[in-house]
Amino acid sequence: MLSRRLVVAVYDPKWFMEVVERLRRRGLPFSFYYTVEELPEYSVVYTDSDEILRELDSRRDLTIVYDPEKTCRGLEKAVLNAMFREDYTLLTIGIDPGLTHAYIALGDSTLLGWGFAEQVVEKVRELVECIPAKSKVVRVGGYSRGLEIAKEIKDNLRDIRVEIVSEYNTTPSHSRGVDGLYRGLRSILARQPYLKRNKDIIAALKISLKQGVEVV
């Protein structure tokens, strides 16, 4: 997925652990910073440290993402830089409003995040703030409180397109697994066994891939 080496050079211990967890959860390759001489040519270095920033000054071949505020958006910019990109064309967030609100986020065809959220609006706000994208759409399944949740998202995040999606054929049985999913996502799911086993996350994924009716 990444075209250039992504190097983590984070000084703050708490943020370091979170960065490593975020990257590993997505299955992204990366390495750690030790000395400036050991860095491969044309690497992308993500750092929160002004001291490390000064150390890297002699290497003009590097792309440095300096993020002293330690933000998820800064980290995502580093990931994008490693792919020779500045942003995603489309951020799509799918929400399955069942007993637990499952969500999934896709940047074009790249899996960016997934999980469960009690506060759906705040989770959508967080994803939108973290992920640079030219366009954004939130797709909410129409069952249960779907329309109510979609309206709440639209009322609080006016600049985002929100759609209500039919949930027909979105909730898989355990035996069917990921049958019928968009072919380009099968390899992603193969690297994330947890997703394949969780029918709510799979439902959110299918919702994210279905065009719905815009909520206005």
Image (cartoon, helix red, strand yellow):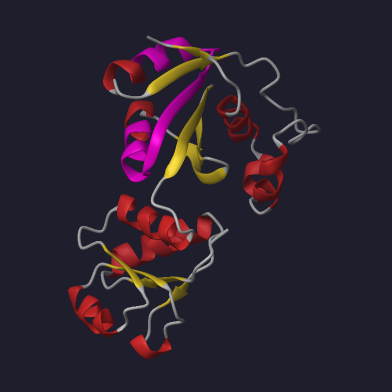
Res 80 quadrant in image = bottom left
Q: Residue at x 55, y 45 (%)?
A: 111
Residue 145 seen in the figure: no
Q: Is residue 122 above or below residue 65?
A: above
Place residue 18 in its image quadrant. Answer: bottom left
Q: Is residue 146 above or below residue 191?
A: above
Give how far across and how far down residue 195 sits, in percent: 63, 43
Q: Is residue 166 magenta?
A: no
- Left or right of 71? Residue 123 is right
On the rendered structure, is 195 left or right of 153?
right
Q: In this view of the protein, which residue sits in the foreground, 40 or 121?
A: 40
- Name the residue nearer the viewer: 117 or 157: 157
Residue range (magenta) = 124-152
Query: Which residue sits furthest bottom?
Result: 37
Image quadrant holding the N terminus, namely: bottom right
Which residue is farthest right? Answer: 175
Between 122 and 66, the residue placed more toward the observer is 66
Relative height, residue 101 to residue 185 (above, below)? above
Quarter occupied by the C terminus = top left
User: Taking the image as drawn, is residue 185 in sight?
Assistant: yes
Q: Residue at x 47, y 32 (%)?
A: 93
Residue 3 lies, in percent from the top left, at 54, 64
Q: Is residue 214 left or right of residue 68?
A: right
Q: Residue at x 46, y 36 (%)?
A: 90
Percent x, y for residue 123?
Answer: 37, 34
> Is residue 147 on the magenta stretch?
yes
> Which residue: 38% across, 61% down?
19
